[in-house]
Image: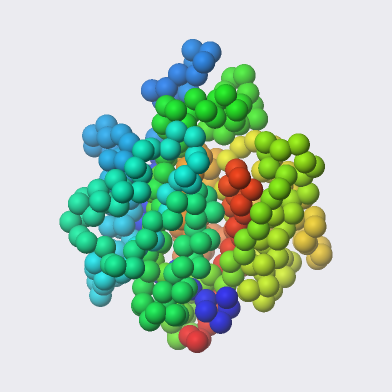
């Protein structure tokens, strides 16, 4: 992908710790969370803890997702006065079809409601991608095709999701996936929306945050299987992304992932590292924004890109080369290589 690199040019975000990208990213940088009791109870009669987005009205379901998406999209487009939302394809990442408690008619409802909320008709190339956390990888690949294959100048990749839904919480509690007083090996549910604008690399001496590689893989030893975990799927995804970017894992300065709690994901990340890394590194930090905003499903990939853009622009990243990786419960894995560098357009 290095010959067809994508420049990340702007962002927008709304989460439980901030109603815009600067506020959310600052809170994540400082390790601030907004984890509180939700309106849901678990089977033991305890309030479920979560990270919710507080809007001016108590909207629920697809209406709230649309409101959050509208906020992120407005912020993302605000600094680009040459284009309107009608002129830019919008690729929206949503929860996977088999996600427990997934809202009925999610695609149709969100697609119509978000346009009504913004008062626009999306570009004809706009699409919905219902692939959960790994959707961001597919969206980046689709954006590359639109930009380098069809001459589109800008593409917005967005995502919104909420796990603060009764049936979803019930299903995950039954699977012992929620963090509770009786289960320390679980995640805290949350909700968020985010958007990033991408485009072709600009011929300039100024460095840009570039997406140089995207790789995918499939893990057979999922959390629900009885197979021994060897991180085969994540290793495959990382190696594919590194090959596209034309670099080694040793060149990466830090990692940022969708890990949201539970031993499985941390073990997988560690195993993948030991199988690929061949150089000695004194430090190789792993960041996981879900510590602050909770498990936000399909939105986390775009949240990660937004956080990376903020770390680079605010100059607090531990380096200029970043490995991002994400995974779904069905075993799908995605890895993304980002770098802050100057690069001539191809």
Which is nearer the eye, 206 or 143? 143
Residue 53 percent across, percent down from the top left: 36, 38
Tell me if 193 is positioned left or right of 171 in this view: left
- Does the rendering let one see residue 61? yes
Tell me if 262 is positioned left or right of 299 in this view: right
Residue drawn at x 28%, y 67% as measured from the top left: 123
Which is nearer the eye, 78 or 233? 233
Q: Is residue 167 above or below residue 44?
A: below
Which is nearer the eye, 283 or 96? 96
Residue drawn at x 66%, y 54% as measured from the top left: 218
Q: Which residue sits furthest left?
A: 119
Q: Is residue 280 above or below residue 31?
A: below
Q: Quadrant of the N terminus?
A: bottom right
Residue 166: image quadrant is top left
Residue 299 percent across, percent down from the top left: 45, 49
Residue drawn at x 27%, y 40% as measured from the top left: 63
Q: How many marks?
A: 0
Q: How is the image coloured?
A: rainbow
Residue drawn at x 50%, y 39% as measured from the top left: 99
Residue 127 percent across, percent down from the top left: 37, 61
- Does the rendering let one see residue 79? no
Q: Which residue sits furthest top?
A: 45
Residue 29 percent across, percent down from the top left: 51, 49
Q: Is residue 314 above or below residue 262?
A: below
């Amino acid at each position: 992908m290095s010959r067809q690199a994508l420049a990340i040019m702007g962002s927008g975000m709304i989460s439980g710790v901030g109603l815009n990208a600067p506020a959310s990213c600052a809170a994540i940088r400082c390790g601030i969370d907004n984890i509180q009791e939700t309106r849901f109870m678990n089977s033991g009669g305890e309030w479920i803890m979560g990270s919710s987005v507080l809007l001016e009205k108590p909207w629920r379901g697809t209406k709230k997702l649309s409101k959050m998406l509208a906020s992120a999209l407005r912020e993302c487009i605000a600094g680009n006065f040459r284009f309107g939302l009608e002129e830019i394809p919008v690729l929206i990442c949503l929860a996977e079809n088999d996600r427990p408690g997934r809202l009925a008619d999610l695609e149709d409802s969100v697609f119509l409601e978000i346009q009504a909320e913004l008062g626009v008709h999306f570009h004809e190339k706009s699409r919905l991608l219902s692939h959960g956390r790994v959707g961001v990888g597919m969206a980046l690949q689709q954006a590359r095709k639109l930009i380098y294959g069809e001459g589109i100048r800008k593409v917005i990749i967005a995502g919104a999701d909420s796990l603060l839904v009764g049936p979803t919480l019930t299903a995950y509690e039954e699977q012992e996936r929620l963090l509770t007083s009786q289960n320390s090996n679980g995640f805290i549910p949350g909700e968020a929306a985010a958007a990033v604008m991408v485009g072709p690399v600009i011929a300039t001496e100024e460095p840009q945050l570039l997406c140089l590689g995207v790789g995918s893989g499939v893990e057979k030893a999922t959390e629900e299987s009885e197979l021994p975990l060897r991180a085969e799927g994540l290793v495959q995804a990382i190696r594919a992304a590194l090959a596209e970017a034309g670099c080694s894992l040793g060149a990466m300065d830090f990692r940022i992932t969708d890990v949201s709690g539970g031993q499985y994901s941390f073990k997988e990340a560690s195993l993948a590292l030991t199988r690929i890394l061949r150089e000695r590194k004194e430090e190789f930090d792993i960041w996981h924004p879900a510590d602050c905003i909770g498990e936000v499903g399909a939105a986390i990939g775009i949240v990660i890109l937004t956080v990376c853009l903020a770390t680079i622009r605010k100059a607090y990243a531990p380096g200029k080369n970043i490995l991002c990786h994400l995974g779904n419960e069905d075993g799908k894995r995605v890895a993304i290589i980002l770098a802050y560098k100057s690069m001539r357009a191809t």
